[in-house]
Image (spheres, rainbow, N blue to C red):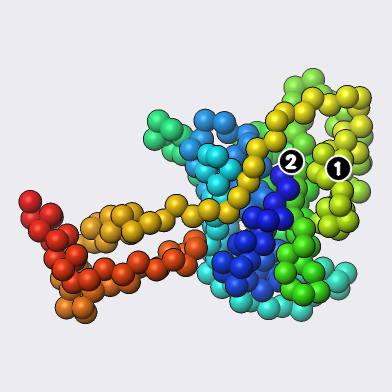
Amino acid sequence: MAQTRNVALEAQKVHQASPVAAAALGRLLTSAALLSADFKNAARIRIEVDGDGPIGRMVAEARSGGKLRSMIKNPQVSLPLRSDGKLAVGRAVGQNGLFKVTREEYDDAIYQGQVELVSSEIGQDLAQYYTLSEQIPSAVALGVLVGRDSWVQASGGLVVQALPGSGEYIGAVADRFSTLNHISHRLAEGDSVELLAEEVLSMGSLRWFDPEPLFYQCECNRTRSLEILSSLPREEIEELIKDQGVEVVCHYCHATYQFAPTEMEQLLDRAAD
């Protein structure tokens, strides 16, 4: 389970995202948080969704310690509401594309999996990934509520997975899951994700693990930006020197780092050494 209102709101502020873009980002960040809880040895979980909708490519990352960040190509997308009054996240993302997951372990091992987008509403796509790529039948409920002031009011989600020997419970759990269509409204009204989980499972006492904090934090800095520049071909660095320096902008937090021509010349000197 993940309650991600503060994370989703911070992402919306960072990217100045429209309501539909904020909802898509919030769901993707929640998915990354849920996946990171599954893979305890993962140093980083990265989800990339690239459909053919106007929102373009989206990325959400979860790192150890509960650190989350995101990027989005077109955060200002605005679309009419669906016929049921909900934000048109699926239309913004687009129907044709992939849901990609990359898991980086602490030993530098990298595991990747991907599935085709099912609904582009993110929740069903995450369930599809669990079922096909991880081979774990799963039910997923995600929700982001954007208020009348256009800012995120609630965000969260939960995943229930069928483990060996749980066949007798699957039907009942699936039926209860259908009541979570308005999970974002429940969270906005003050219900906790723990309460939602108890309603869905409803099979006696549950064992609760200690909660872990989640927060939006980018890991960019001046040193890492300089390392990116150092990987450029020598010819491109020389051109940047002629342009009187360069400015690097982080796509995750929009921080800017400026480097003078003298610093770029030092890169060439190091490359020569």
Q: Could you tell me which quadrant the N terminus lies in? A: top right
Q: Which residue is mark 1?
A: 196
Element class at badge 2: loop
Q: Along the line of sight, which residue is nearer the eye, 70 or 220?
A: 220
Q: Position of residue 268 (x, y in %)?
A: 13, 61
Q: Residues within 10 Å of mark 1 (few under 14, many from 20)?
A: many
Q: Is residue 200 visible?
A: no
Q: Which mark is residue 131?
A: none
Q: Is residue 68 above or below residue 164?
A: below
Q: Are marks 1 and 2 in contact (CB under 8 Å)?
A: yes
Element class at badge 1: helix
For residue 267, side relative to residue 76 (left or right): left
Q: Position of residue 32 (x, y in %)?
A: 61, 47
For residue 121, side relative to residue 113 (left or right): right
For badge 2, the amino acid type reads Met
Q: Which mark is residue 1?
A: 2
